[in-house]
Image (cartoon, grey):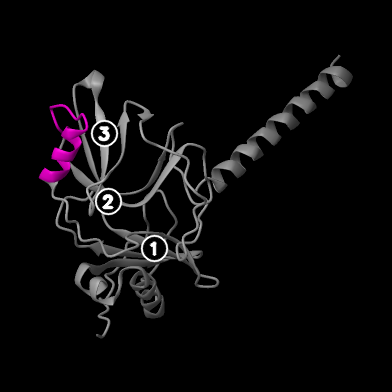
Amino acid sequence: MAISYAQPQSPPTEITGGPTFERPAPSTIIQKANEYVIGFVGEDYFNSKFSLNDSYTSSDVYLVKYNYNIPYSYVHTGVLLFIYVNNESIEFYEGPKKAYSFTITEQKAVEIAKNNGLQNPVDNPVIEYLYGVCETGGLPRPSNKKPNCLIIDGYVWDVSGGDFNARKTFYIDVDSGALLYSINGQSVQSATPPSDFKHPKNPSYDYTHTRNVLTLAGVIILILIIIILFIWFKYFRK
């Protein structure tokens, strides 16, 4: 079955909070991105569920964005894929890594959550992509493993509800209906330490690298300022 490629729309010249993008990604990059996703979900599934939303080019990365046609409300706007400009390697991919059927309906997801302690009022359930959650707070990443984290790396029903002081959130597998974990306030009830995460196709991407570098630079600058002030007060102040 031939792969159908949609034509990218005209991109904006700038994305708020991110780098400046100048033009659509080349057709070779679109094809590379398509083939990468097909490697996870299969060609037939890709052709029936995916359409190209847009693509952009910056000095460092290409961004390819897809619409993912699923039958329920979805909290993200689409599937994202970043490709390095210099060597065209995949930097980051957030999207399905199998052909989801979404067999668990919204009503069934609410029923499963209620059977596990969900109380009224119930928020509008949504489907979201979730990499994982940590008992100590924050989100785990392939390159940023934390203790007591549960790795999902897939699509879940997010069902929340209850009174203000007793709210609970339940994450339910969209295909099997398994209760993956629940959150009562800030406590992850069923989070367990994951095995070492090594996905055969999704490369690690360190979201914390830039933040850590800036933090280290700030500490070094602060130390230097303290040393300079100490020397000035000790030897030069009259």
Q: Where is residue 74 in the image (x, y as percent from the top left)?
A: 21, 50
Q: Residue at x 86, y 18 (%)?
A: 234
Check the image and name the residue furthest to the top.
238
Magenta extent: 107-122
Quick one: SS at disc 3? strand
Which dot marks residue 76? 2
Where 228 sits versus 2, above or below? above
Where 136 sits versus 154, above or below? above
Residue type beneath disc 2: His
Where 166 sits versus 37, above or below? above
Q: Position of residue 10 (x, y in %)?
A: 29, 69
**Residue on which disc 3 sits:** 169
- Dot 2 and dot 1 residues touching (CB under 8 Å): no
Quick one: SS at disc 1? strand
Within the image, what quadrant is residue 26 found in?
bottom left
The N terminus - image quarter:
bottom left
Q: Residue at x 50, y 70 (%)?
A: 89
Q: Where is residue 170 in the image (x, y as percent from the top left)?
A: 26, 37
Of the numbered discs 1 and 3, the one sitting upstream in the chain is: 1
